[in-house]
Image (tube, coloured by chain):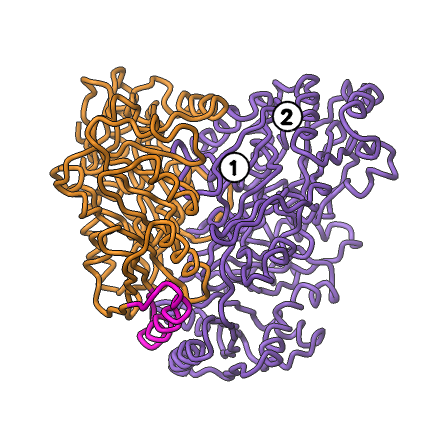
Amino acid sequence: MEMPKANQMIIDAKPSIVAGLAQLLPKDAVLHYLNDTRPYECDALAAYACQPLAVVLPRTTEQVAAVLRFCHAHAIPVVPRGAGTSLAGGSLPTADSVVLSVARMVNVLEIDYPNRFIRVQTGRTNVSVTAAVEDEGFFYAPDPSSQLACAIAGNIAMNSGGAHCLKYGVTTNNLLGVTLVQMDGTIIQIGGAYMDSGGLDLLGLICGSEGQLGIVTEATLRILPKPEGARPVLIGFDANEVAGACVSDIIKAGILPVAIEFMDRPCIVATEDFAKAGYPDCEALLIVEVEGSDNEIDLQLALIKEIAMRHNPVAFRESKSAEESQKIWLGRKSAFGAMGNIADYMCLDGTIPVSALPLVLRRIGELSQHYGLGVANVFHAGDGNMHPLILYNANKPGDLELCEAFGNDILRLCVEVGGCLTGEHGVGVEKRDLMTVQFAPADLEAQLNVKDVFDPKWLLNAAKVFPLDVSASRRATSV
Amino acid sequence: MRPQNEAELAQILVEAQLPVEIIGGGTRAIGDVVAGATPLYTDGFAGIELYEPGALTLVAGAGSLLSDINDQLAVEKQRLPFEAPDYAAVLGREGRSTLGGVVACNAAGPRRVQAGACRDSMIGVRFVDGAGTIVKNGGRVMKNVTGLDLVKLMAGSHGTLGVLTQVAFKLLPVPEASRTLFFDGQDPATAVSLMAAALGSPYEVTAASFRPQSGTVLRVEGFDAAVKYRASALAKHLKFYGQAQISENSLSVWADIRDLKPFVGQTGDLWRVSVKPSDAAGILAKAAPLDYMLDWGGGLLWLLLPENTDLRLLLGTFEGHATLFRGKGGGAPSFQPQSPAIITLTQGLRAKFDPKAILNKGRMG
């Protein structure tokens, strides 16, 4: 993975840039010593790191606007950062960039239960949004696995999903309004605590724009009443194909589970060794969770059981208590930890049409043999969002490159069968160079045109999302 | 002009120098396009390209008739989630709605409160921009964050950024049963608070609407045994607001609300206002409409005003949006003027996607 050459003139001007930023912000809000900026050199895609020029930690929208206005005037690249949990390198700095972190912007600004929304500063973590409203029986629906740590700003930047989005949708379906600061410092209100804003759907455009169109400092989020209850079942099968067919039949039957999670044998074995959740010895397992009152849950689970039985499962475990539910989820929730215990791993995020599942899993198995690297599959089966985990050894020279080549082949396969490169993690730098696999030049040009409108100088997170050669002529205008 | 494929359409737009008006079914266009624009019909782009019931996915031509699509989905007991309305009658128009038209105005019926609008179910588009370039975005899978989301941008763009040729949706199963709860005799403020209590309950209310003549109506949908339980639990939860009548068969009640039946044939301007539900009563007091309906728990107001009334003058500054849906509105623009910063962005986007300024020129301000 290549990053553009840093602008030496900007690096040389560091003292005056830091002094300029210090005039705009409180004393403790500008970091520029190597020891202080080191935590910002990478995000959760830790294979890549780079020290930024400086890091700023504003507390208000006005401070964000002041920093952006300053950087715009001096043509200094800016890399926005939420909590730094991106798996795609979305907040990887360049040496000539200022990292703008919203980590100190964590306030709840307004909670309105009758109108069912909450307005927050976007540095607030995903889970603490729900925490702010759950005493009144509400929750914020998108629930990425990193929800304990990840910030709403990053959720909006990547249009994050989660295990429960089959029923509740992803971030874009739960976002009502934002305060956006443009690169030139203009502050804009888009949308609000109402459902339709008239005009073009700029909110939809900003959600998932990976920090390239502006910095979202405040967000109005839809909150939902918590269901009366939820319970999972665990179903084991002796073949991936059969598990896939069962998912399709459940959906066709008119049941809308909140989650359908899939794990293949390598993943089951690894999590079993690690978490000892008591999973059955089988080729594939599904965890299907439904919601409602006790009676409604019983009803839906009975239907699911009837459907599953037609596929001769090797195991069917229905939860009867909170404890049993926890046990069913234990293995799935430990999957990434279990993998990390065995080896270094790279987590992919392609989406495929559900019907292509057996073919894709078979091809991934063949590729695994070809590259000599192990792979385990966990995924959100209801919506086809796969998370293959490729195992490698970071200390072995050449292994990371091998792993990346393997990953790229899997993502190409996802596109080939009608899917896409990323379902919820975002493109960042990780999938940047594969964009031409999914998009024709005209498709990319249309997206580049949108960035031109919001950030004509291409200063905001400019080395991400688009292959460097595709964005080269535009980025040149900023130097 | 009636292109039969994307290449023909692209050629037309490459060559076009004068304004064109994109026409699907011609049933739901809001606001005028400049006089003399050449009509461009989309019926060459009809038909289902891909329908996978097991994956809840549909890909179809933008010129497909909404009714044809609904019929096809019904065979598999599935539907578009957002309850697409048919406005032909209330707008006094001939013709039949197309998928492209539904997308272009980001339509949504009463189920908006639960399932979102058209844009929330859209997963892919193909379109030809004003320069004649064929563009695709999104695809056929439900979760996709690859690149900028032009799918959402196209939804509700009223044909100002491109001519849609193909759209992809995620679908939902048609539930086995539904129940409708009727509450009599509220003033609008009480109705909004009743609807807030309903929508804030765990009983999965899929629609909440109010008319002064008929009171508040709520809907629950799902498996028969489940909706039976939820309807009675909901009635109990809301007993403060009076005794609910529960009906098992009320499809026509919701079709009438969805298609604005009460306003069909009534004289007057019709305005559509989107606000925070708790602001609805205040809006009504200022507007003093001849007739009205609240939908989306009070978040959407349909106001019938005397002919040639500019509602925005009556409301002054308010938090939300008012669109002139039918009538002259005292010369008010159909679409509410936006803030200067949003106008700049909008003009910038239109200039990029339609550099010759020929697509539905005059619409959306």
Residue found at x 64% / y 73%: A330
* Residue that protrudes farthest toward the top in the picture: B17
Q: Same subunit under labels 1 and 2?
A: yes
Q: How many marks?
A: 2
Q: Which residue is mark 1?
A: A206
**Secondary element at image label 1:** helix
> Foreground: B325 or A13?
B325
> Foreground: B78 or A45?
B78
- Chain of the residue on which disc 2 is drawn: A
Mark 2: amino acid: Leu
Evaluate whether residue B40 shows in this view.
no
Residue found at x 41% / y 73%: A246
Q: Quadrant of the C terminus of chain A?
A: top right
- Chain with orange colouring: B
CA distance separating discs 1 and 2: 16 Å
Position in image of residue B332 (x %, y %): 29, 23
In the image, residue B327 sits, relative to residue A419, either above or below, namely: above
Residue found at x 57% / y 59%: A387
Crowding near pointer 2: few (<14 within 10 Å), some, many (20+)?
many
Residue found at x 63% / y 29%: A460
> Foreground: B269 or A300?
B269
Which span of residues is magenta-colored?
A: B220-244
Check if residue B241 falls in the magenta segment. yes
Left or right: B119 as drawn, with respect to B342: left
Check if residue A224 falls in the magenta segment. no
Tell me, what hue is chain A? purple
Q: Which numbered disc flags the more N-terminal residue, 1 or 2? A: 1
Position in image of residue A443 (x %, y %): 43, 34
Query: What number is the disc on residue A459?
Result: 2
Residue B35 in which image quadrant: top left
